[in-house]
Image (cartoon, rainbow, N blue to C red):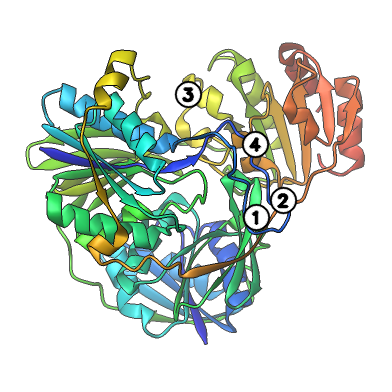
Amino acid sequence: MKVLVPVKRVVDFNVKVRVKADKSGVELQNVKMSMNPFDEIAVEEAVRLKEAGKVSEIIIISIGPQQAQETIRTGLAMGGDRGILVKTDQITEPLAVAKILQKIVADEKPDLVIMGKQAIDDDCNQTGQMLATLLGWPQGTFASEVKLSGSSVVVTREIDGGLETLKLTIPAIITTDLRLNEPRYASLPNIMKAKQKPIDMKTPEDYGVDISPRLKSLKVEEPTKRETGIRVESVEELVSKLKKEGAI
Amino acid sequence: MTALVLAEHDNKTLKEGTLKTVAAALKVDKDVHVLVVGKGCKGVAEAAAKIAGVAKVLLADAVAYAHPLAESIAPLILRLADGYDAVLAPATTTGKNIMPRVAAALDVMQISDIISVESSDTFKRPIYAGNAIQTVQTSDSIKIITVRTTTFDAAEAEGGSALIENIKAGETQKMSTFVKAELSKSDRPELTSAKIVISGGRGMGSGKNFKLIEAVADKLNAAIGASRAAVDAGFVPNDFQVGQTGKIVAPDLYIAVGISGAIQHLAGMKDSKIIVAINKDEEAPIFQVADYGLVMDLFEALPQLEKAL
């Protein structure tokens, strides 16, 4: 069984982002970039399936600038077999990414695509669902457990009221939620080994996909700040303040 | 032009998020229709018909829709989409699951998680876990939108008298089947619509200690939430999680107990009207967003609070 794992290079989740003065976006210069945390979980899940003998090949894909190659290397160091970089310096929207992935799926014919439920930069939460539609595949989004059984995959999903379990025919799309697994750190020998693994270099044009953005970003601003309130000294004082405000 | 709102419900009751999504839809279009998809959900359609401002309710009631499978519902919306210039759903796990399928099939970019309608084609939405707000304009002929319901006031639940039109179910699909659901049962108000929420973090120390929070919640008729740290530590189930990757809440009163205030958590609750933080670490970032901060050990504070209420 073959698995594709698309990964996105994003601002590291520990970085406090700053909005640019001209409101054109957030500052990306000299900011630490990493693999989107949900995508790390996706890579980890694929690697675990491979370690369990259920998956034979893992292909790590990224669509982004030249440096996204490093993100692919991270995935290869975690246990991916080879990579594909679709190089572009443009901002790529989920729809465009899904269209490129659709073409890659047609070439590679994987049984599963495992990907993060959302990227922590644009917070769209769309690409997996869109890819599933374009391919005519079922989807198991926000997965907290994935079990392969013959020609189907049973996915437990984190939903608002609790958990939901679905059975999907294969091929299928799975998008990962936080509690699916805890991604490993790549060991130094594996990081060295990953440098030898092949990465195919492509462009969106190679796939004939128009990636021009559909949405126009008019401005990006700081959110309105909450004013810091006051310190209370005791529970009694807290309760009396809240009563005065009519909050309780 | 007319907007279509996908109703959020459990086949018995219409969820509050639907009212808020209708309110958002009325800012996009003058006419709003509501689509109720489910099984044995006529009561939900009747409730939807009473929402002020709703002109028509479409009811697709069929066995195939007993569970809201994206693979079944998206094609139904797609069939109806022709008559609308916008389709909106609450940004719940259901809406987030279904709507991108509709958008991709229509070849349009979905606008996720809007927090305001600036004009019929321009919207604000949070990015980077709410650390930045982006204003986006679409030129797509049909807008596919999910709505962050906490930032919209609900449309009036009474006052409307819309017509209910039964519509035919679509073809059944076999690629995705429902196996089971494990839903948390609780007599407490729902986390996303509660007037008061009290949440515990890593500082609670154990799941058992959440009893202290329950006791206060009982007095206040509050919903109970948790930080990601508390969920990851296994103190409480995942659906308690408040934060960017959990539930977004904006109650009248939010009480954060033993929560340090990671960006992730703040993104899920900082639109609450009044925020109270109880934490023994006076440097905890949660105090920067709190209206009332109490530096105190939660194991002393919670029993005192319960008594004082």
Q: Are marks 4 and 2 in contact (CB under 8 Å)?
A: no
Q: Which mark is residue B133?
A: 1
Q: Are marks 3 and 1 in contact (CB under 8 Å)?
A: no
In the image, A45 versus B6, the foreground residue is A45
In the image, B165 versus B191, the foreground residue is B191
**Separation of disc 4 and disc 3 at Cα?**
23 Å
Instruction: Give the letter of the chain under mark 3.
Output: B
Q: Amino acid at mark 1?
A: Ile
Q: Give the residue drawn at x 11%, y 32%.
A: A56
Instruction: Give the letter of the chain under mark 2.
Output: A
Helix, strand or loop at mark 3: helix
Number of the front mark, 4 or 1: 4
Helix, strand or loop at mark 2: loop
**Separation of disc 4 and disc 2 at Cα?**
13 Å
Q: Amino acid at mark 4?
A: Lys
Left or right of B260 in this view: A122:
left
Q: Which mark is residue A223?
A: 2
Q: Are marks 4 and 3 in contact (CB under 8 Å)?
A: no
